[in-house]
Amino acid sequence: MFQSLDEKVKGKHCDGMAGIIEEGKATMEEDFDETTMDACLIAAGQRAEHYEMAAYGTLVAWAQGMGHTQAARLLQQTLDEEKATDKKLSALAEGGINQSAADAAHPEEEEEDEEPVAVAANGGRKSSAKAGRR
């Protein structure tokens, strides 16, 4: 792509991505159970993917704006790959890993046979439905 634009390839350190990588490293040093670690690593991977998607989306727009259709096409392919990776990570997380990590973090909150009772703001009691539970 750079050759087709008669440009030299230059690398530049990215503080934002370096921070995301450092956060991921710090997560790996935590003493989490295996499922929670998996959920955290998926989240860290998605932060990196989202950062990359933002960058590639901007580059696609710039290339299109400058009329560099070949470069825009190549950048769009890379953006599409980043989006596909993000979807795969979401599928892993939503496919049970996040719920398993939540269950491991709060084992005492297993579903009970009776509905929970909430205390109303005025001090009275009222029944509440289980919202968002399995």
Image: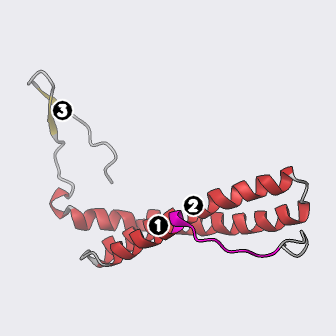
Is residue 15 part of the magenta span, yes or no? Answer: yes
Q: Which numbered disc, 1 or 3, marks the residue that appears first in the sequence? A: 1
Query: Which quadrant of the rendered structure holds the C terminus?
Result: bottom left
On residue 51, the disc is 2
Image vertical order of residue 9 relative to residue 122, above or below: below
Image position of 69 (left or right of 76): right
Q: Which numbered disc, 2 or 1, marks the residue that appears first in the sequence? A: 1
| Secondary structure mostly taken by the magenta-highlighted segment of the chain | loop
Image vertical order of residue 44 relative to residue 122, above or below: below
On residue 114, the disc is none
**Residue at which label 3 appears:** 127
Image vertical order of residue 31 relative to residue 100, above or below: below
Q: CA distance from mark 2 to mark 1?
A: 9 Å
> x, y percentage for residue 87?
58, 64
> x, y percentage for residue 63?
83, 57
The magenta span reads: 8-17
Please give the name of the residue rendered at 85% of the width and 65% of the height, measured from the top-left corner: 71
Label total for image: 3
Q: Which numbered disc, 2 or 3, marks the residue that appears first in the sequence? A: 2
Q: Nearer the viewer, residue 39 or 58?
A: 58
Q: Residue type at mark 3?
A: Ser
